[in-house]
Amino acid sequence: MSTVPAEIAGIGSTAQRLRVSPGFDPLKASVGPEEYFVLSRIDGTQTLREVLLTTGLPIDRAVSIVTRLRSIGALLVPGETTAPSPADPPKRAASPRSAAPARRPTPQNVPIMSRAATSGSGAASPGAASPMPAAPAHDLSLPSATAEELAALAEDTDLAERERRRILAMARLAHGRDPHALLGVPAEADARVLKLAYFQISKEIHPDRYYGKRLGSFAARMSTVFEATSRAYARLTSSDKGRAAAKQLASDQPQTPQEYAAELFERACQVEISGDALEAMKLFAAAVRVDPQARYLRRAASCALAAEQPRTAVEYAKKAHTLAPNDPSVARLLASAFRAAGKLADAEEVLVMAMAIKSENDVLAAELRNDLAEVRRLLAH
C-alpha cells in the first residue's frame, strides 16, 4: 500500500480527525517507539490522512500502527468520549510477512523459472471482481548468474525465492542509465503506468516491510535498489514527458497548480523515506512554492532538520506556524528548529506559548513540557 486508503477497518474514513483517549497510558499499554511517535502526531486538528502522510513511515506501516492504537483504546473517533474495549488482547503492529517460505535454491533450479515467474504476472482467476495490475517486468531467470548472485540465492534467509530473484535482478539495473528498465516498464509508459510500477515495487522491496526478518546480504541490496528506484521514478516523472503524461491521468483537463504541488509533495515523501533527505528537500521546496500549505511546510521543516539544515527548517516552520498558530504540534516543530539553529531563547518563547494552547493530546502536552525543561536546562548553562 503506497497511497492512503479512503477508509480503515475498525476506524472508518481517513478524513476524520481522531483524538487521543483521555487518560490513555502509553507505558502501561507497552506502546513501542514508532507507535508512540504516531500517537504523538494525533492532536485532533489534522485528519487521519494528513497524520499518515506526515509520519514519514510507509503508508501500510502507519496504517497498521494506527489500527493497533485504536484496538488498545488509544484513539477516539469523532463523537466518542471513551474508546471501545478490545474483545481480545491486541497484537503489536508488525510489518507484513511473506506468505511463501524461503526455498533454498539448488544449482539445477537457479536459471530455470516459469514464464509466469519471469514476467511477474499471472492471469486473473475466474470470477475475480477486478484483476490486479501486472507486476513490473524484470528478468527473474538471472541469465549468466555470477558466483556472488548464486551464493546470495543459496543464503538461509527469510525471503522467498521470487523476492530474492527480484532484488538481484533489480540490483543489476540499479546503477544503469535506463530508469524504465529499473522500474520494469516500457519506454513509452505513461504516468499512470509509471506510478503503478513504482508503488508496486515500493510495496515489495521497501526495507521496512521486512523489519525483523533475516535478510543476510539482501539487506544492503534492498536499500540500494529502493533508493535507485525512487531516483528513477523522480527522474521520469519530473521530466517534460512525465509532466505531460501526468496531465492525462484521469482526464484531458490541465493539471491545476494544487494537483501539481500534491504530486511533488507525494514524491518528496517517497524520496525522503528512501533516505535521500537532500533530494527530498528540493521536491518539498518546489511543492511549497506552488502551494504553501501548512502540511507541506511542516514536512519540509522536518526534512530540513533531518538534513541538518536548521536555517531552512526555521524558515519553513515559521511559515507553517503563521498558517496554523493554534496547532501545538506546529509550535513544537518551530521550537525544535530554533533549538537546532542555536536560538534557545526563541525556542523557549515558542514552547511557553504552545503550552498555553488547548490540546486534548496528553502525549503531545508531555513532550512540550519535556522540551521546555530541556531548553531551560541548556539556557542555564
Image (cartoon, helix red, strand yellow):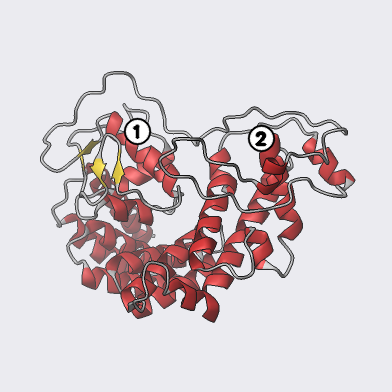
In the image, which is nearer the foreground, mark 2 or mark 1?
A: 2
**In front: 179, or 327?**
179
Q: Is residue 373 above or below residue 194?
A: above
* Mark toward the start of the polypeptide (2 vs 1): 1
Q: Is residue 19 above or below residue 379?
A: above
Residue at which label 1 appears: 68
Q: Is residue 116 visible?
A: yes
* Amino acid identity at mark 2: Leu
Determine whether, in the image, residue 308 is placed left or right of residue 89.
right
What residue lies at 70% left-to-right and 41% top-to-bottom?
Answer: 164
Residue 248: name its quadrant: bottom left
Determine whether, in the image, residue 237 is placed left or right of residue 85.
right
What residue lies at 51% left-to-right and 57% top-to-bottom?
Answer: 196
Q: Position of residue 262 (x, y in %)?
A: 37, 68
Q: Is residue 239 visible?
A: no
Residue at which label 2 appears: 159
**In front: 381, or 269?**
269
Callout 2: SS? loop
Callout 1: SS? helix
**In front: 110, or 222?**
110
Residue 99: name its quadrant: top right
Q: Position of residue 158 (x, y in %)?
A: 66, 31
Please identify the residue farthest to the front as the structure is shown.
126
Q: Quadrant of the C terminus?
A: bottom left
Q: Position of residue 144 (x, y in %)?
A: 88, 49
* Amino acid identity at mark 1: Arg
Distance of label 2 from label 1 (alpha carbons): 26 Å
